[in-house]
Structures are given as C-alpha cells and as structure tokens.
Amino acid sequence: MLKSVGILLVAAVILFIEVPPLLEKKYKKELIVFSILLAFGVGLGIAYSFGKSIPNPIDLLTFIFKPLHDAITR
C-alpha cells in the first residue's frame, strides 16, 4: 500500500511540473496524450507494486510476427 501511495505522489509531482506549461501554451492534444500515458504508467506501476505480472511487449510482437516468420522461412 505504501508503494502505491509513493507512485501516486511521484505522479502528482510530475503533473505539477509538466501540466502548467502545457496549459499556458494551450497544447490540449499534448495534454490529453500526456495524461493518458501517465495514467497508464501509474496503473502499471501500482499493479506491479502489488505483485501482479506485467506482460512484456515483446511477447505481443512475437505472437503477431511468428506466424509470418514461419510462413516466409518455409
């Protein structure tokens, strides 16, 4: 539980540093993308801190491209 609070505090610090310049320059699209990526990262960080297994992105790429590779090399 303490780890998740720490992750949320770090995310809050990142928000306080990064969001005001985006709002000043009226970068709405960048703010939306930043918020989505930060929320995704915080969610993964909290899940990892609770001991959940986080899948490796390479596993997804292997799943997608292995049949293509096998078809080409035959």
Image (tube, rainbow, N blue to C red):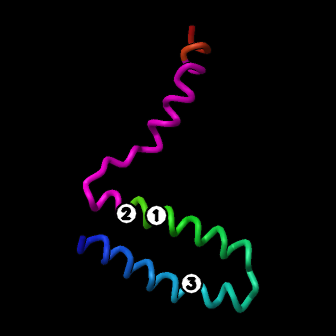
Q: Which residue is mark 1?
A: 41
Q: In this orientation, which residue lies closer to the viewer: 53 or 59?
A: 53
Disc 3 marks a residue whose amino acid type is Glu
Q: Is residue 3 left or right of residue 37?
A: left
Disc 2 marks a residue whose amino acid type is Gly
Residue drawn at x 50%, y 36% as measured from the top left: 60
Residue 17 at x, y percent in the picture? 52, 88
Extreme residue toward the front, this view: 1
Residue drawn at x 35%, y 58% as measured from the top left: 47
Q: Residues within 10 Å of mark 3 (few under 14, many from 20)?
A: few
Q: Secondary structure at mark 2?
A: helix
In which quadrant of the rendered view does residue 35 lie? bottom right
In which quadrant of the rendered view does residue 25 lie? bottom right
Residue drawn at x 30%, y 51% as measured from the top left: 52
Whether 62 is drawn above or below 43: the answer is: above
Which range of residues does the magenta coloring cover? 45-69
Q: Residue 50 has which mark? A: none
Q: Is residue 71 left or right of residue 60?
A: right
Residue 15 at x, y percent in the picture? 52, 83
Residue 14 at x, y percent in the picture? 48, 82
Q: Which residue is mark 2?
A: 45
Q: Which residue is mark 3?
A: 18
Whether 17 is drawn above or below 32: the answer is: below
Whether 37 is drawn above or below 74: the answer is: below
Q: Are marks 2 and 1 in contact (CB under 8 Å)?
A: yes
